[in-house]
Each structure stands twice: as structure tokens, then as C-alpha cells.
Image (cartoon, coloured by chain):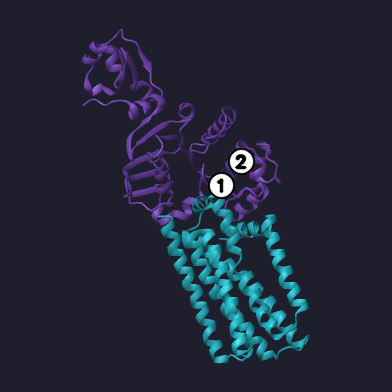
Amino acid sequence: MKGIMLKDLYENFYIKKNLASYIFGILFVGFGIIFIHTDFAFALYTMFLSVIFGSALLEASYEQDEKANFGKLQITFPLTKAEIVLSKYLLALISTGICVLISLVYALVNVYLWDLVTLTEALTVWGLSICVSLVFTSVVYIFYFLLGKKVGMIIYVVTAGILGGLYGSSSMLFGIDSYTSVDMTVLCFLLPASAVIFALSCLLSIQIYKKKYS
Amino acid sequence: MEYAIEVRNLTKRYKGFSLDDISFALPRGTVMGLIGENGAGKSTLINSILGILDSESDLTAMLGLDMKTHSKKIKEDIAVIFNDSHYDVNLTPKIIGHILSKVYKNWDAPLFLEYLERFSLPEKKKIKKLSTGMRVKLEFAAALSHHPKLLILDEATSGLDPVFRDEILDILREFTEDEDHAVLMSSHITSDLDKIADYIAYLHDGKMQFIKTCDEIRSDYGIITCGQELFDSLSRDDIVAYKKEPYSYRVLVKNRAKLRQVFQDIPMENASIEDIMLFYVKGEKMK
């Protein structure tokens, strides 16, 4: 599985156009983080960081694999079909983990440096961002495996748009408190539930992949 | 005898096409050429053996192990080159080596570098900047650097010029110098198989027509050009297929030696693998 994960990393960060997309994304979010200090932006960027970047790895590698029809060659490697899919999910988990850590740092900066939210509020939003990014990745990955890069990309953008729209409208209607004051009990339920959804998504993608190559 | 590949009653069904009850065995230390027209089922057979496609079979074994239960172990010891599935062209040979070092337990990095040097492949040049021939050589370098015992090639040399193909044949000859190694290669370029194959397996319309050694093909098959009278006198059992031409028949016959005893004076050409394939596909069969 290490080989497949390494290949995906090379395809994401060695190929210039893919690297450029990441740099552009980081600059875009980075400027927002540095210059916009509101509670609305805090919640938006905390989630945006882990949701968008955490699940972006499959997009580039899937595109490259489709171009070269690498999937067929990959099956001749000493790996099962399940392990091939699992390696993609593991990499998503690792990248989401890194993004979640970065967003934790950002959340703490908002607490201690900019004095924008309390620690409890920051951790609540941060916890929600973990749930949303796991569910987002779960949904998007299924479509990548089911319908390929083109449709997967559309689903990725549409789902991100829906999430953004929901966040924008809900914070306008109910205020940002609806996120910062989520009950810890609810969060304690949401976290394992999103982990279960992630695991189910992986199992479903394995079945889709097996069916694709059958 | 332990075979490099052993397949018993393999069947793969699609709508409108099925690979039908295929059985064959490839002994170690030999090269088998898999021939057949487009759509005959060569790639389907290779993909089914490799588990890329699901199929039904009584046995699909490689290197003495059953694919159903030991596929990971088997895949450590085989290498496959396709004509339609490759590495990302934006990567470099060096990166491919790095990736494969994490894929195969017995990856031999110095051997890979040796192959790159031997094939004059620049380590740090992107694949997209290499010629078609160089790309195929890179795939061979990548395929051979984990010390595989079985090499499976699916039209891997198509699109290459004769000089490159000849170099690839040299690599294959070298590979099969080891008695433990074997090669299964599907190819449209039957002249290459004439040069290197020990066995020819002929697939037509999803069915295995024959598996013969190249020596058997040379000694068994012949082509007779004759008139109606001689054509009528030939035994129907000896005629594989024929083509009616304006004033004569061209007939692909088997049992060449037996026919030679009966018809001592008639000219009989040697039949190449390509001739045999063309007669099977385009020739008329005796009713």
C-alpha cells in the first residue's frame, strides 16, 4: 500500500499543475486567515481547511491514473483490490489528519492571539470540522470510484458549494452561535458517527472497485 | 512438472462474447506466443489469468500456486507489461523506481539503475519526453527489476519499429536463459514470435484453436497451391482451410509428412504463424 500512497503523493505534489493548484488554494485561504478576523471567518476557515484540502488528494491522482489507465497495471502489483482502495482512504485520512492539526493551530490562534472565541467554542467548531471533513470525503470518494474523475470532480465542487451555502445561510439565519455552541454530547455522537460513515464509504468503494474490475 | 502458468477450463462471459473453456499450461523455461485476431480474446484471457477480470475456472495457477488463494505471493514474482496501461508520463524513471521499491519486497534498486544505464534512459527525464521505444524499455526495466520469474506481455511491443523490437527480443532471450523463467506474450507481430516462441497458442473467437510447439507448426503445417483435381484428391482430414483463387486453390494442410509420402512431387511451402492465422480466419473450412 505504501507504493500506491507514494505514487499518489508524487502525482499530487511533483506534477507542477497539481502543485500549483495547492499553492493557489493555500494562498487564497492564507490571505483570508491573515487578514479577516471575524467569528464568521474563523468557523469558515477552520472547516474549509480540513474539508477541502483533506479530501483533495484523490482528485489529482485519479485524473493521472485515468489518463494513463494505470488502474490495470496497479492490479498486477502484489496488492488485493481492497488494499488498493484502502490505500486511497488511508492517504485521505492522513491528509485530513494533517489539515485538522493545522486547523487546530488556527483555532488556538483565534483563542489566544486574536481573542476572537473561547477555547470551548474553538474546540467545538474544530470538532465539527473533523466530522464534516470525514463525511465530505466519504461522499466524494464514493463518486470518484463509482463514476470516475470527471463526475467525481463535479460532485466534489457541488458538495463543497452546498456545504458553503448551508454554512452561509445558517449563520445568517441563526447566527454563528449555532456552530460555536453545539452541545458537547451532540459532538460526542457526531464524531464516532462520521468515523463509521467513513468506514462504510471505504467498504462501499471496495465493492465498487471490485465490480469495476470484474 | 511445475508450470509457470496452468489454466484449466477458464471461462469468461460477456454479452455477445465469451472466452470458452480455455485450458493450457506453460512450462518453465519457455516462451509462449498468444496469437489471434483483434477481439479473439487474448487480452481477456490475460486479464482473467491475472485476476483483473473475474472469471470461472477449475484452476488458474502461476508458479505452482493457485491464484485464488495466493495472488499476492504470485504477484511478487511476476511482471506484466500492457500496451494500454502505463505509468504517469509526468513522472521520471527515478520516481518510478522509488515507487516500485515500496511495491515489491524484492525490488533491486541497483539492478533498475543498471537497466536504465543499459537502455540509455535518463533517470531524471520525464516519461513524456521519452520516445515510444524508450518508454517501452523503461517498462521492461521496471518489470525486470524485482527479479520476476514470469513475464506476461500484452501487445507490449506493438507500435515499436523493428530495431527496437529486436532489442526487446534480446531482453526476452536473456530473461529466458534462466530455466526457471517463462514468458507469455500476446502479439500481432507474428514474425517476432517466429523468432522467440517455443509454443504458439492460437485463440479464435474466444476458443483455443490449438497449442503447439513452433517445431510442430513447422513440421505439421504446409501450404499447397493446386488445381481442382489435386484439391479433390486431398483427404478432407488433412485440409485445415483453403482459399479459392481465380485458377487455383491455396490450401493449408496438416500432417505434412504423411502428405509428402502420398504426393511426392507437389510443391509445398512452409506455413508461417501468420499464414496459419490468416487461413483460420479468412480461409474456407471443409464441410
Quadrant (top left, top right, bottom left, bottom right) of the N terminus of chain A: bottom right
Residue marked by disc 2: B135
Chain letter for purple?
Answer: B
**Quarter of image, res A55:** bottom right
The residue sitting at 21% across, 15% down in the picture is B232
Residue marked by disc 1: B86
For this rendering, which residue is in front, A116 or B93?
A: A116
For this rendering, which residue is in front, A67 or B267?
A: A67
Residue B260: percent from left, percent from top: 29, 13
Residue A71: percent from left, percent from top: 51, 53
The residue tagged with tag 2: helix, strand or loop? helix
**B63 displayed left or right of A12:** left
Colour seen for chain A: cyan
The number of numbered badges drawn on the structure is: 2
Q: Chain of mark 2?
A: B
Residue A181: percent from left, percent from top: 61, 91
The tag earlier along the polypeptide, 1 or 2, is 1
For this rendering, which residue is in front, B274 or B247?
A: B247
Q: Are marks 1 and 2 in contact (CB under 8 Å)?
A: yes
For this rendering, which residue is in front, B70 or A46?
A: A46
Q: Name the amino acid, label 2.
A: Arg
